[in-house]
Image (cartoon, helix red, strand yellow):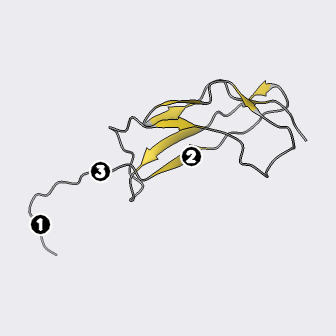
Amino acid sequence: SAISGTFNITVGAAASLSVSTQPAGASGGTQFATQPVVQVVDAGGNLVTGAGNSITVSIKAGTGTTGAALSGTIGGQALSQRHSDLSRERIG
């Protein structure tokens, strides 16, 4: 075995979003019991602490129930965005 010299580990630039907590437990018109958490990460999956990116959540087109929509606070600036009031408006 060998001992290395001191080195610094740095986080890279914002590269993608990571959903660290998936939403769960909602029925039509009620808030998700488990609210989603979306994070800005670098190419290595590390949380980018200085990110000021705007994050907006939505239902992917062509998925879910026709006419389904999210309500609540669905956008904002964050490096780790924890939602507290999202709900699904229609269940199919």
Please give the label number shown on residue 11: 3
Circle nearer the N terminus (2, 3)? 3
Toward the bottom, the furthest residue is 1
Q: Residue at x 45, y 32 (%)?
A: 78
Query: Image quadrant for the C terminus?
Result: top right
- Which amino acid type is shown beneath numbered disc 2? Val
- Which amino acid type is shown beneath numbered disc 3? Val
Circle nearer the N terminus (3, 1)? 1
Q: Residue at x 51, y 33 (%)?
A: 81
Give the image location of residue 39, x and y in percent. Answer: 48, 42
Q: Are marks 2 and 3 in contact (CB under 8 Å)?
A: no
Circle nearer the N terminus (2, 1)? 1
54 with respect to 32 (left or right) = left
Q: Residues within 10 Å of mark 1 (few under 14, many from 20)?
A: few
Query: Image quadrant for the N terminus?
Result: bottom left
Query: How far apart are the two marked residues, 2 and 1, measured between alpha carbons?
Result: 35 Å
Please give the label number shown on residue 19: 2
- Identify the residue position indicated by label 1 in the image: 4
Q: Residue at x 87, y 37 (%)?
A: 91
Give the image location of residue 43, x and y in percent. Answer: 39, 58
Q: Secondary structure at mark 3?
A: loop
